[in-house]
Image (tube, rainbow, N blue to C red):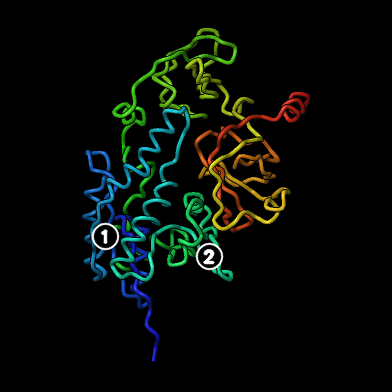
Amino acid sequence: MRSRKPSVIVALSGGVDSAVAALLLRDRGHDVQCVHMTNWEDDGYCDSARDYQDARRVCRQIGVPLHRVNFTREYTEQVFTHFLNELERGRTPNPDVLCNRAIKFGVLRSWAKRLGGELLATGHYARLSRTGAEMRLLRGRDPGKEQTYFLHAVDGADFRDVVFPLGDLVKSEVRALAKSAGLPVADKKDSTGICFIGERPFSEFLKRYLPTAPGPIKTLDGELIGVHDGLAFYTLGQRQGLRIGGVKGRDEKPWYVARKRLDANELIVVQDQDHPPLAHDYLQAEQVHWIHSAPGSLRAGGMLRCTAKTRYRQPDRACTVTEAGNGRLDVEFDEPQRAITPGQYVVFYDHDRCLGGATIHTAKRLPERRAAGQAG
């Protein structure tokens, strides 16, 4: 007699990834129910209404029930408020990380349990491996889609009843499975960026919630070349939206945000995306979160050699991590990294295993490295 497969609640966004996750689990013999979350009231830019209709069509196609839940209040209180507070501090937050921790693997996970689900599944490109009592978070097999960066803030214990059906697949295989099954979202374009902003300029959206605070845009040598709307509306490395036209005596190369001088309300820009002010090899991080406990080398007062990334779409690079005191970490990269940005996350890896991460507090170029680079 075959043992019963555990029941699964699948978080169904209305996109192809979560649809295929539900399909695979159904075909493996699980009792599958799907749930579509509304985390933001649709204002014409966020496609939540269309996504819900797509989720309904998928569930009709594969013959599983669909529930709809509204976590708008929880999302506003636990994610969006933090997002605005960080922007007002001149930092650049990533709400998707906090959404995973607080909403998907927080309130949704609890809701799924109340519904009777034994497991929660999502369409993330990531893998889980049980080692003793630990659930280890591993990179997904598709290097272009793997999403452990966004999952690093979830507690290891909260992965014990989670499954990632797409972890061993690449995107082309997911699309092929969707087409073979005739899923109505097989060719649906992937969503990008932050849902609640949608297809509109970032600054246009923020001006509904944050006051403008105009100030000077200056070059490194202090030349005034423009006016910004407020430091909250810009991020390091940004090129678009600076409204800097031709500057007398300068070539036509694009300008990039290199620094924010909060005390003077100044935005400092440079013309080379690889300009030295945009290259940092050291950062200090706070609000440290290890998926399980801190690595043994750090607990013993030593250093951790690992790799880390400071943005989602970048390869992780070799670094040395040490305790800085007051709950902070010092992270020194072997080579300079471009535009390390306060408010973003540094995420640590041991080969395929995601160890955890922290919020970037400050970043700079170490003096000895700077001197060596100039001498070279």
Among numbered discs 2 and 1, the one appearing first in the sequence: 2
Most extreme residue toward the bottom is 1
Quadrant where the N terminus sits is bottom left
- Establish if 117 lies above or below 80: below
Whether residue 259 is situated above or below residue 226 in the rendered picture: below
Q: CA distance from mark 2 to mark 1?
A: 34 Å
Left or right: 103 as drawn, with respect to 73: right
Secondary structure state at the residue bearing disc 2: strand
Residue 222: percent from left, percent from top: 56, 10
Q: Nearer the viewer, residue 58 or 230?
A: 230
317 vs 12: above or below: above
The image shows residue 5 at horizontal and vertical percentages of 38, 79
Front position in the image: 234 or 72: 72
Residue located beneath label 2 in the image: 135
Residue at disc 1, secondary structure: loop
**Residue shown at the point (65%, 55%) measured from the top left:** 295
- Kindly identify the amino acid type of the residue bearing the numbered disc 1: Pro
Residue sitting nearer the eye, 42 or 183: 42
Q: Which mark is residue 370?
A: none
Residue ID at (25%, 70%)? 64
Residue type of the residue flagged with mark 2: Met
Spot occupied by residue 73 in the image (x, y as percentages of width and height) = 28, 45
Which residue: 53% across, 33% down?
A: 342
- Residue 154 location (% of width, % of height): 47, 54
Residue pointed to by mark 1: 184
